[in-house]
Image (cartoon, rainbow, N blue to C red):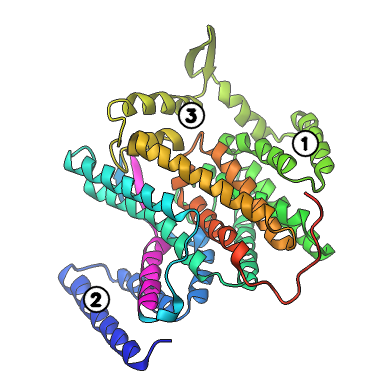
Amino acid sequence: MLTNTRANVLLEFIAVFILLAMFFAFNVLNFPAHYFIIFLVGVIFFVLAFVSSNLVLFLVVLATLLSPEFEVGAIRGRAIMIRFEDLFIILIVLGWLARLAMNKELGLLKFTPLNTPILVFLLIEFVSTSLGIIRQEIKFQNSAFYFLKYAEYYLLFFMVVNNIKTMKQARFFVFLTLATCAIVCIYALSHLPSGIRLSAPFEGKGGEPNTFSGYLLLMMSLIIALLLYAQTTAQRVTLLALGGMALVSFVYTLSRGGWLAFFPMLTAFIVLTKRYRHYFILFFIALVIALPHMLPQRVTERLEDVVAAEKEYQIMGKRLTFSASTAARIDAWADGFSKWVKKPILGYGISAGGVMDNQYTRVLVETGALGFLVFIWLLVRIFHAARRSFVGSKDDLFARAVSLGFLVGFLALLIHSLSAATFILIRVMEPFWFLAAIVVALPHLEPLAAKGGEAHAV
């Protein structure tokens, strides 16, 4: 544990640093008065991380979808947005690292199968971005904000995986994740009568429906998996209600990229588990047959808009027309490849991808073939880690459900990434990496005093 002398010295240092920082910010730089509140909350988060990691993780889960954002700049017509927890997570990690440094009993960072590809990918991003800044192909300010945002996800993963010690903690944080999803869905559904595309809170004017659809794909996968392994009627009713809210919210995001990933998500459940597989197959068939006759008008119009005659393509000798938004996503592939071939090894650096709504070509443009290969390596490691956790948790229904839900959600997000830069979207990636940390940690957690039942065959 921390000695009194060490703790006092560190707290005195923190107090002096805070006072100096406040004086410099508000008297020298003349920061607006409301920044003082943000600064003060950040200090509180730092101290909490130093004292209690569990309390901070509780606040982080709530903040993932319920945190305001503000604009700090723009890149090629798209605003650079920073959310309050972006700043707080950095302070949280610093507080946690200070705690590790002061308390030798906490041990070193845990090794996971994801550590190496994450660190290598971050290194490549740093090198490619530094070269891009030196060549003056990208701006330092824009690139720094994006790089820190990307790094934030991995810092969150490392912090969670090193602080989850027991199955009781894992259950609590998964419950909290579902509770946050319920709050967000209630907020979204409250806007259903307005006729706008549904989005999460604090998304600014117009919202980010496609981002919200990616988040809901991950949450629906988790909810369905927990429903498959639910052991009481109360659990099933609660999960069905939450799943229903998430599904309606998902449909009314009117996100075609999200819809594209929905059926592969259901297919993944059929392939990965035998549990109630016949019900899944029947539901899948019934859904395919019934959908054309039960789709709301807004959904039908959105689907018909895909082939609106706004841009023409020649594909295999046939003339096809698409809407402007669909055409932009198709063009993202061609534009990305044409830009990548000019700097194929390390790319142009972070933020060079601009507004490219495609994760894969964006990685190619920003980090080149080297970064793309490491990114694929990371994705493969995530898949194997989640599958290993799922296969190895036959004696714990909760661990099995969470692993399956995360695995299916991950596969759905890979499809979603065809039409969005999904793996850099903060509303999706913060809950994704939080759950990834739990899933990776599951095989090593201390079990509950009494485990609930035996799992059926997979």
Whole-percent x, y for residue 110 in the image: 47, 65
- 264 shown above or below 65: above
Marks 2 and 1, Cα distance to the nearest angstrom?
58 Å
Going from N to C along the chain, the mark reached first, 2 or 3, is: 2
On the image, the x and y values in percent for residue 68 come to 44, 60
Q: Position of residue 319 (x, y in %)?
A: 53, 9
- Helix, strand or loop at disc 2? helix
Q: Residue 97: which disc? A: none
- What SS does tag 3 mark? helix
| Mark 2: few/some/many CA within 10 Å (<14, 14-19, 20+) | some
Q: Tag 3: residue type?
A: Ser
Q: Does the stretch in magenta take in 85?
A: yes
Q: Earlier in the sequence, mark 3 or mark 1?
A: 1
Q: Which mark is residue 22?
A: 2
Q: Residue furthest bottom?
A: 4
Q: Are marks 2 and 3 in contact (CB under 8 Å)?
A: no
Residue 325 badge? 3
- Could you tell me how far apart the alpha carbons at marks 3 and 1 are, in whole angstroms? 29 Å
Q: Is residue 297 or residue 318 the one in the foreground?
A: 318
